[in-house]
Image (cartoon, coloured by chain):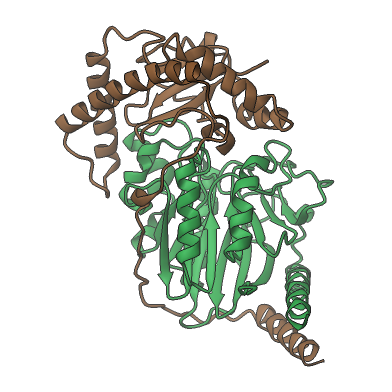
C-alpha cells in the first residue's frame, strides 16, 4: 500500500519535473576527472583447449617470433620521443609516421609467414574453425564481416604495408580473442575480408597475415 | 518477498516513467520521430530538463567526425543548448574521426565544429569506434589519458566506465568487472561504440559483446548504457532493468535504418542527426534528444537502479 502510494507520488513528482521546462542557468563546479589504470588487469584465459602438445609446440614457434617482433618494436619506440598522454594531432601524426618508417626500415626483408609461422598457421586456422563451427558461428562471422566486405587481394595488402586508411577496423568478438594466442598490447588481430591480420597498432602497419583464415 | 515486490514495483515504475514522460514530452514538443524531417526550419532547442543548480549535466554524441556541413549544423544546436543548459562534459561513443586522421582532420572534424564548446571549457571524454585509430587515445582533447579503456568520476556518486568495444580483450573484460565491483557510485554509466541492443538494419545488436558485458552490467548495477555505431538515435525498451541508448546520430545519418519490427524500440529517430543532453539530479537522470533543426525528439527520466542485495 505504502509502496504504491510512494510510487504514485514519485511518478507525479518526476513527471512534473520533466514537464516543467525550467530554463534556469546553473554553473556547477568543475568536476575533477579521475581515471584508473588498466595496467593491473589480470592475465587472459583461453576458452578453446587445452591444446595438444603438437599444437602447443607449433604455436610456440609463433610466440618466439612475436617476442622478437615486440622486442624490436619496443627498441624502436625507445628511439622516438615518447608521445605525451595529452598530445596534439601534429605530435600524434608525426610520431606515428616516424615509427611506421622506422619499423619498415628495420623489417625491410619481412615476408608473409615470418610471424604467423608455417607451423602455427594451420593451428590458428583450426582454432578459428572450432570457434566458427559452433552454434553461434554464423553470427560470429557476421559480426566480423560487418563493414568488412572487402577483397584483400584487390587491396594488395603487404607485410609492412600501411593498414588501408579506407578500411574501418573490424570488430573482433571477445570469443575469438579468448581463443587465439595472446598478443602484447602493441599488436592486434584484425580481419580484412577473410584474412587474419596482425596489426601493429602504433605503426599502423600490417605485421603479418594469414590469407583465407576464416572458414567459408 | 517484500523485497521482490518492491523490486518489481521499481522496475514497473521505471518503465512507466520512461514511457509516460517520453510521451508527454513528445506530445508537448510535437516531435514524433516520423514527423521530424530535415527540411524543418531551425528552431531554439527546448529544454525539458530540470536544469537544477548542482546537478550533473552532460551531452552524448556519436559517429560524428565527418567534417561535413550536417555535423557542423548539429554542433550549432549543441552550442545553442549550452547557452541555456550549462553542461560541462560530453561523452563520445566512438567514430570520432572518419577517413584520414591527419592533423587537419582533427581540426575539421572535431576542433572547429565544437570550438565554442571547447572554448567554454566543455570537456569531451572519448571512447573509440571502429573507424578510430588507436592513437586517438593520446589526443589531449579526448581526455583518454593514453588509455583504450578507462573510468572517470565527474562528480561524487557518478562514475562512467568507458570501454573499447572493437577489440574487447579478456583483460579489458576482467578490468571492467573489477572496476564495476569496486565502485560504490550510485550512478554507474557505461559507454562504448557497439550497441548491445539496436534495431539497426545496417549493424543491429552485437550479440557476442552482449553475452560478455550484459551479465556484468546487471550484476554490478549499471543503470545506463550509451552506444553508437548504428547511425540513428534509439532508446531501447528497458532490458534487464538497464536503459540502453544508441546515439550514433552525430554526423552521418542512415535515414530510415531503424527496423520498426525489431520489437525492442521504445523510441527511434532516424530522419535527421541528433545528440543527447542529460542531467543527473539525485536518483533521476533526465534526458532530452535534440535534432539538427533543434527539435526535441525524445525526452524522459531514468531512475537509477539500486543494488538488489
Q: Quadrant of the N terminus of chain B?
A: bottom right
A27 in relation to A67, above or below: below
**Outermost residue toward the front in this view:** A53
Q: Quadrant of the C terminus of chain B?
A: bottom right
Locate residue B182, reporting x and y percent: 45, 65
Q: Nearer the viewer, residue A106 or B31?
A: A106
Locate residue A182, reporting x and y percent: 43, 32
Which residue lies at the image location 35% right of the left edge and 38% below the top edge? B135
Colour used to depict chain A in the structure image: brown
Residue A193 can be seen in this image: no
Left or right: A184 as drawn, with respect to A119: left
Q: Nearer the viewer, residue A172 or B134?
A: A172
Q: Nearer the viewer, residue A131 or B285?
A: A131
B97 in relation to B238, above or below: above
Left or right: A66 as drawn, with respect to B27: left
Left or right: B29 as drawn, with respect to B65: right
Specify the quadrant of the image occupied by residue A44. Answer: top left
Locate residue A50, reporting x and y percent: 54, 29
Which residue lies at the image location 29% right of the left edge and 26% below the top edge? A70
Specify the quadrant of the image occupied by residue B224. Answer: bottom right
Q: Nearer the viewer, residue B130 or B219?
A: B219
Specify the quadrant of the image occupied by residue A108. Answer: top left
Colour used to depict chain B in the structure image: green
How many numbered discs sit on the rendered protein? 0
Left or right: B42 as drawn, with respect to B172: right
Locate residue B267, reporting x and y percent: 75, 58
Residue B207 can be seen in this image: yes
Amino acid at each position: 500500500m505504502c509502496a504504491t502510494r510512494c510510487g504514485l507520488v514519485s511518478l507525479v513528482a518526476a513527471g512534473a519535473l520533466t514537464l516543467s521546462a525550467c530554463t534556469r542557468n546553473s554553473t556547477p563546479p568543475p568536476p575533477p576527472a579521475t581515471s584508473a589504470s588498466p595496467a593491473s588487469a589480470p592475465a587472459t584465459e583461453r576458452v578453446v583447449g587445452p591444446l595438444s602438445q603438437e599444437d602447443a609446440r607449433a604455436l610456440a614457434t609463433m610466440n618466439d617470433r612475436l617476442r622478437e617482433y615486440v622486442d624490436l618494436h619496443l627498441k624502436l619506440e625507445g628511439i622516438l620521443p615518447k608521445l605525451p598522454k595529452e598530445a596534439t594531432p601534429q605530435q600524434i601524426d608525426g610520431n606515428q609516421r616516424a615509427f611506421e618508417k622506422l619499423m619498415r626500415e628495420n623489417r625491410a626483408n619481412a615476408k608473409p609467414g615470418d610471424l604467423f609461422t608455417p607451423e602455427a598457421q594451420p593451428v590458428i586456422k583450426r582454432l578459428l574453425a572450432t570457434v566458427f563451427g559452433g552454434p553461434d558461428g554464423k553470427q560470429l562471422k557476421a559480426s566480423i564481416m560487418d563493414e568488412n566486405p572487402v577483397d584483400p587481394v584487390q587491396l594488395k595488402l603487404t607485410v609492412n604495408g600501411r593498414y588501408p586508411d579506407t578500411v574501418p577496423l573490424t570488430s573482433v568478438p571477445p570469443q575469438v580473442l579468448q581463443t587465439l594466442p595472446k598478443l602484447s598490447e602493441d599488436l592486434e588481430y584484425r580481419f580484412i575480408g577473410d584474412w587474419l591480420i596482425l596489426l601493429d597498432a602504433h605503426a599502423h602497419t600490417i605485421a603479418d597475415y594469414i590469407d583465407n583464415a576464416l572458414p567459408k | 518477498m517484500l523485497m521482490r515486490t518492491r523490486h518489481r514495483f521499481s522496475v514497473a515504475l521505471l518503465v512507466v516513467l520512461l514511457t509516460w514522460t517520453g510521451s508527454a514530452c513528445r506530445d508537448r514538443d510535437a516531435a514524433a520521430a516520423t514527423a521530424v524531417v530535415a527540411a524543418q526550419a531551425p528552431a531554439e532547442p527546448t529544454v525539458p530538463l530540470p536544469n537544477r543548480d548542482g546537478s550533473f549535466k552532460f551531452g552524448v554524441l556519436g559517429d560524428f567526425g565527418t567534417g561535413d556541413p550536417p555535423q557542423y549544423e548539429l554542433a550549432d544546436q549543441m552550442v545553442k543548448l549550452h547557452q541555456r543548459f550549462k553542461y560541462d562534459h560530453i561523452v563520445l561513443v566512438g567514430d570520432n574521426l572518419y577517413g584520414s586522421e591527419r592533423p587537419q582532420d582533427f581540426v575539421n572534424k572535431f576542433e572547429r565544429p565544437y570550438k565554442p564548446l571547447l572554448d567554454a571549457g566543455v570537456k569531451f571524454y572519448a571512447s573509440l569506434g571502429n573507424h578510430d585509430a588507436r592513437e586517438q587515445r593520446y589526443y589531449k582533447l579526448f581526455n583518454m589519458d593514453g588509455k583504450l579503456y578507462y573510468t572517470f568520476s565527474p562528480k561524487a556518486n557518478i562514475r562512467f566506465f568507458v570501454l573499447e568495444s572493437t577489440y574487447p580483450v579478456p583483460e579489458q573484460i576482467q578490468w571492467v568487472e573489477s572496476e564495476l565491483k569496486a565502485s560504490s557510485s550510485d550512478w554507474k554509466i557505461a559507454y562504448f561504440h557497439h550497441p548491445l541492443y539496436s534495431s539497426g538494419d545496417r549493424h543491429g545488436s552485437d550479440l557476442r559483446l552482449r553475452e560478455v558485458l550484459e551479465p556484468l552490467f546487471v550484476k554490478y548495477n549499471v543503470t545506463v548504457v550509451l552506444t553508437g555505431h548504428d547511425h540513428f538515435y534509439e532508446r531501447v525498451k528497458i532490458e534487464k532493468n538497464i536503459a540502453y541508448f544508441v546515439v550514433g546520430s552525430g554526423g552521418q545519418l542512415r535515414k530510415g535504418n531503424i527496423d520498426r519490427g525489431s520489437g525492442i524500440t521504445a523510441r527511434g529517430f532516424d530522419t535527421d542527426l541528433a545528440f543527447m543532453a542529460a542531467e543527473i539530479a539525485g536518483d533521476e537522470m533526465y534526458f532530452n534528444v535534440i535534432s539538427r533543426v533543434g527539435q526535441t525528439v525524445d525526452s524522459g527520466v531514468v531512475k537509477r537502479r539500486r543494488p538488489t542485495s
